Amino acid sequence: MQQWEIENVIEQYSDMLYRLALVRTGNREDAEDIVQQTFLKLVEHYDKLESAEHIKAWLLRVCCNQCNNYYKLPWKKRRVELENFTDYIGVQADCEEEVVRGQQREWLMQEIYGLSEKYRTVLHLCYMEEYTPAEIAKILGISTNAVNVRLNRARKQLAQRLDKEDF
């Protein structure tokens, strides 16, 4: 294991893992901690990994496991959810149209964060990371049917939320 190899992997996948952890935790600092823990596991197990695609899938699986462990922590159970997600989606606009689009995106993200963690995760992996349901099933360690059910339920819940607010 060469240091430059690990640095390349970290540079290549850190944004993807951060986005996944942020979607699952809803907290910037916790997401950063989870990504750091994921890369520590990478350093420990780098020699066992076979190919670039195997590394990517392995990192996503480890990140999901770290997020699952995060929810088991005693202080997580006593936390109060954030009410305002403006820290996650900054609106930087030069014109009125861009401001409106940014506000809609912010509102949409708030609605997505209103879904349960398991629905947010499959939505993120499907639409942001562009994985197929079969690939998501392998990453999360569940069946393809379970992924499809979660995707359908997430879409329905999101559609209901959007209809209520006249998005």
Image (cartoon, rainbow, N blue to C red):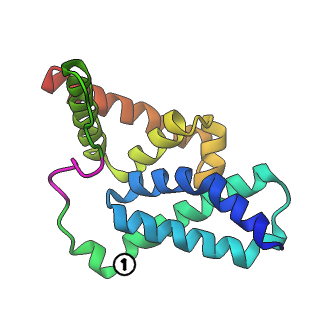
The mark tally for this picture is 1
**Which residue occupies 42% across, 50% down?**
118
- Residue 148 visible in the shown view: no
Q: Quadrant of the N terminus?
A: bottom right
Q: Nearer the viewer, residue 155 or 80?
A: 80
The answer to whether residue 57 is left or right of residue 150 is right
Please identify the residue farthest to the front as the structure is shown: 94
**Which residue occupies 46% across, 51% down?**
19
Q: Main secondary structure of the magenta part?
A: loop
The answer to whether residue 151 is left or right of residue 10 is left
Residue 150: quadrant of the picture: top left
CA neighbours of label 1 inside 10 A, class few (<14), some (14 to 19), many (20+): few
Q: Which residue is mark 1?
A: 73
Residue 72 higher or lower than 59, as above or below = below
The magenta segment: 82-88
Q: Secondary structure at mark 1?
A: loop
Residue 4 higher or lower than 124, as above or below = below
Q: Nearer the viewer, residue 119 or 98?
A: 98
Residue 44 is situated, as x and y percent measured from the top left of the image, at 72, 79
Residue 82: quadrant of the picture: bottom left
- Residue 118 visible in the shown view: yes
Q: Nearer the viewer, residue 156 or 109?
A: 109
Residue 54 higher or lower than 67, as above or below = above
Residue 164 is situated, as x and y percent measured from the top left of the image, at 14, 26
**Which residue occupies 77% across, 49% down?**
53
Residue type highlighted by circle 1: Leu
Residue 5 is situated, as x and y percent measured from the top left of the image, at 78, 64
